[in-house]
Image (cartoon, coloured by chain):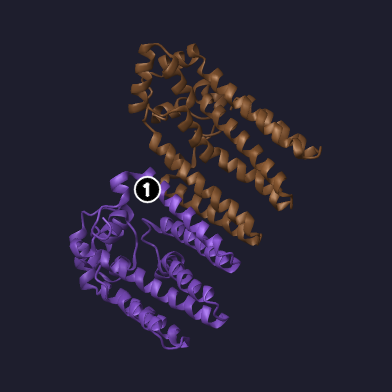
Chain colours: A purple, B brown
């Protein structure tokens, strides 16, 4: 489930979903090339490369309870944050802005991308399936060591720690209830949310270089929204 | 099995194989952008798009015994032939050749790509597993209506026709032996090979515009090899 609807994968199977994804990517590639702006292509090629690397990093850390907070953050910097950074920076590039505005927009995207992913990982344990529109505990089922889970493992009772460690290794939802309790009692979601909020604040600060406008207001709204969304 | 070795998919599973594939593609994308030649990017973007479309077409025709020879050829034009066309044409573009040489090299690649795929589809029924280095009957197992199979269905006895039709619909290797017999008795491989040879001849003809050189000889060799390979 994504956004409350069945995924393409469920509806049409993996081969069709992967191939149509490739097709859409190739369409996007054609649109980029049509701009005839080499810097745009460089940014997108580099971002694609970093994101692919981030996905590999995420796969490698899967089922690894020794994952550190630094490794976790490094993975989301590569994966989600890089995508947001490229999206925000390209707007500044295409509009012909100077170097320091491009860098500021890069920073804006990077910070709200990080906030977005932190919240996403928290929502996997917090939301109801109805609000979130995807399955609760998906990350847990796959043994993905996201920050809320790691934090509860580091700060829970010995018993909670052991259960979480074993669930990261094996994956599965048998202990979802106890693990949600540990996440609650250790304040793991609160901790994750605090990190997301400081990222959003850094994102807002990066907007300072822009002149006031309706667009700047919209970007501010987006940064604020990134930490309060419930789905 | 591919080229006599276990596939990455078998060794490391789908997620790792797909992600490392994405990573390699993104590396290639970076190398293309580094050339700073927009025509190169256009050719590759268009080729990627056509190939993705060809893969979708192939998926749609899977398990469809009503596939016509025209549809089959159209799919391989999109899929394999386009890849060879882009590869051959880009050499001419990067070397700074004039339009008509680029078009000739495109044609060369397109024709030997078509020949390559026709032979590939014939080898799926002809070769021993040892020579081919992949599993015999892979296409049959998936219900892929390739030309040798379609030709045997169109020209076999009523009973053979029925077995082939049902196997395309369901996939599977239960009737591999009878189907290989039908392919043999109808001359389906010979028919496919003849088509491949006329494609290779067209590929050779496209080389006429090039001045004699060691490279031209190598391209000729490649065109000739494309129809005689056994694996």
Q: Position of residue A146 (x, y in %)?
A: 34, 64
Above/below status of B16 relative to B126 = below
Left or right: B93 in relation to B33: right
Q: Position of residue B205 (x, y in %)?
A: 71, 32
Q: Disc 1 on helix, strand or loop? A: helix
Question: Which residue is labeled 1 in the image?
Answer: A17
The residue located at (51%, 46%) in the rendering is: B50
The residue located at (63%, 45%) in the rendering is: B87
The residue located at (46%, 56%) in the rendering is: A56
Which quadrant would the N terminus of chain A be assigned to in this image?
Answer: bottom left
Give whichever of A128, A188 is nearer the camera: A128
Q: Decide if residue A191 is in sight here.
A: no
Q: Position of residue B131 (x, y in %)?
A: 57, 24
Q: Position of residue A8 (x, y in %)?
A: 32, 50
Which quadrant would the C terminus of chain A be assigned to in this image?
Answer: bottom left
The residue located at (42%, 88%) in the rendering is: A212
Left or right: A12 in relation to B18: left
Instruction: Tell me where residue A58 sits by quadrant.
Output: bottom left
Instruction: Tell me where residue B210 sits by quadrant.
Output: top right
How many discs appear? 1
Q: Decide if residue B205 is in sight here.
A: yes
Above/below status of B58 relative to A30 = above
Q: Mark 1 Cα within 10 Å, few/some/many (few <14, many 20+)?
A: some
Give whichever of A44, A116 is nearer the camera: A44
Single out the residue that lies furthest toward the front.
B100
Give whichever of A106, B164 is nearer the camera: B164
Above/below status of B111 relative to A44 = above
Above/below status of A148 relative to A168 = below
Left or right: A228 in relation to A47: left
Chain ID for label 1?
A
């Amino acid at each position: 489930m994504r956004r409350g609807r069945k995924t393409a994968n469920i509806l049409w199977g993996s081969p069709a979903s992967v191939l149509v994804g490739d097709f859409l990517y190739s369409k996007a590639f054609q649109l980029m090339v049509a701009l005839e702006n080499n810097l745009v292509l460089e940014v997108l090629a580099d971002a694609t490369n970093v994101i692919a690397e981030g996905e590999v990093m995420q796969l490698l850390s899967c089922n690894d309870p020794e994952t550190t907070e630094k490794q976790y953050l490094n993975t989301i910097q590569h994966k989600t944050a890089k995508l947001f950074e490229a999206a925000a920076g390209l707007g500044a590039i295409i509009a012909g802005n100077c170097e320091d505005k491009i860098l500021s927009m890069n920073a804006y995207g990077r910070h709200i991308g990080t906030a977005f992913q932190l919240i996403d990982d928290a929502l996997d344990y917090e939301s109801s399936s109805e609000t979130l529109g995807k399955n609760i505990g998906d990350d847990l089922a796959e043994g993905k060591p996201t920050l809320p889970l790691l934090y509860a493992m580091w700060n829970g009772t010995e018993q909670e720690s052991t259960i979480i460690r074993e669930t990261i290794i094996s994956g599965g939802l048998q202990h979802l209830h106890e693990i949600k309790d540990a996440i609650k009692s250790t304040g793991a979601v609160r901790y994750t949310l605090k990190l997301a909020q400081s990222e959003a604040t850094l994102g807002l600060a990066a907007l300072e270089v822009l002149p006031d406008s309706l667009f700047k207001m919209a970007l501010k709204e987006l940064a604020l929204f990134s930490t309060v969304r419930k789905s």
